[in-house]
Image (cartoon, grey):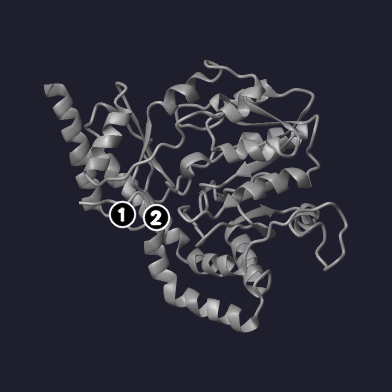
Amino acid sequence: MGILFSAPQVEYDIIREEWLETVAQIGRQGVFVGGTWVSKFESAFASRLGVSEAIGVGNGTDALFLALKALGIGPGDEVITAANTFVATVSAIHHTGAAPVLVDCNDEYLMELDAVRAAVTSRTKAVIPVHLYGQVIDLDDWKAWSEATGIAMIEDCAQAAGASRSGQAAGSWGVMGCFSFYPDKNLGALGDGGAIVSNSPELAARLKKLRNHGGELRYQHDLPGFNSRLDPLQASALHCKLAYLDEWNAHRRQAAGWYRSHLADIAELTLPGHVEPDDTSHVFHLYVVRVGGGRREELKKHLQKKGILTAVQYPVPVHLLPAYAHLGYGLGSFPQAERYAGEILSLPMHAALQEQDVVSIGSEIKSFFAAAKVT
């Protein structure tokens, strides 16, 4: 028995013929940077999210970095985000010269506005709420607070493509939303890619220059820029996959329901909250459980031996990584993030997962804990 953790190769098989034809078109045109396929995907993605502009960039980290740069954020400024995010969120802030300010998570692994408010200083210029694991933070109050305070809200949607809340897509609540198209994401490229979405014509115009050496026209450089462009081969693959995004996300929610059915009686596990099949506020980029009793690593190894691949996202909170020791946070600064980092385990989740796979996973987990009780 072998159960994949993620399955981008399955998605590739679905789009293969269509995508290879677009590759042939790109090859015949000889336009391997920029071009119509990038524009087509940007337009389709913006329309899908209900925003006016989508700007393709090289990857999700660049999306966050360039969004901050578009706001003029730099040395002397502070940007608030989560302690339990992927390091890219914080590194994007760091490389602008601004100071990352971290907050703890709740028991759904999400940031809360009260914690953000408590972290605000006179230097706070922006906040990056992270829609972790595919679940959208309820940003109704955040949006009003952001507008009232003038603290810009940039959404980290790296794991939430296609998610929405109250009929509004993740990425469309703040001044900008940032997406990663890393291959195992819900909307994944066949390599690296990212995008920034916005309803601001001014920010969109600035971003289009920032991603392309500071100007949209060749040899015209209006500001100091960077080289971070979405590749047309990746854009064409994303354009193909975009048609399947809702279907694949619905399957992920169905798989989450299977997990809840087949894992509910395992006392040692804490499962994600129940999500109705039509509730698009969670697209289950990851299915994350908590393993009690300090048995996470043992369970992970047991499942691996049985051909079931799992992962930990993320084993060390950002403030405890050597790269960010200079922020001055120590052990105990963010108790929730620290505790959960030692308990969380991501089980297989992807658009090809079948209920029998989940039954097998549940059976192996039950066997593991049953054996532990016997010994």
Residue sitting at x 49%, y 19%: 335
Indicate the secondary structure of the residue bearing disc 1: loop
Q: Is residue 375 visible?
A: yes
Q: Is residue 244 left or right of residue 150?
A: left
Q: Position of residue 6 (x, y in %)?
A: 38, 52
Viewport quadrant of the C terminus: top left
Q: Position of residue 74 (x, y in %)?
A: 79, 37
Mark linked to residue 250: 2
Q: Is residue 288 left or right of residue 134?
A: left
Q: Is residue 172 visible?
A: no
Q: Is residue 183 left or right of residue 299?
A: right
Q: Amino acid at mark 1?
A: Leu
Mark linked to residue 353: 1
Q: Is residue 204 left or right of residue 302?
A: right
Indicate the secondary structure of the residue bearing disc 2: helix
Q: Which residue is most to the bottom?
A: 28
Which residue occupies the foreground of this view, 62 or 238?
62
CA distance for labels 1 and 2: 12 Å
In the rendered picture of this protein, how many numbered marks are placed on residues? 2
Give the foreground label among 1 and 2.
1
Q: Which residue is most to the left?
A: 374
Residue sitting at x 81%, y 42%: 72
In terms of sequence position, does the residue under pointer 1 or pointer 2 come before the other?
2
Mark linked to residue 213: none
Q: Position of residue 266 (x, y in %)?
A: 23, 31
Q: Amino acid at mark 2?
A: Ala
Estimate how packed mark 2 is, as few (under 14), some (14 to 19) or many (20 or more) residues with alpha carbons within 10 Å: some
Estimate how packed mark 1 is, as few (under 14), some (14 to 19) or many (20 or more) residues with alpha carbons within 10 Å: some
Q: Position of residue 58 (x, y in %)?
A: 64, 56
**Would you place residue 94 above or below residue 159 in this image?**
above
Marks 1/2 in contact by CB < 8 Å: the verdict is: no
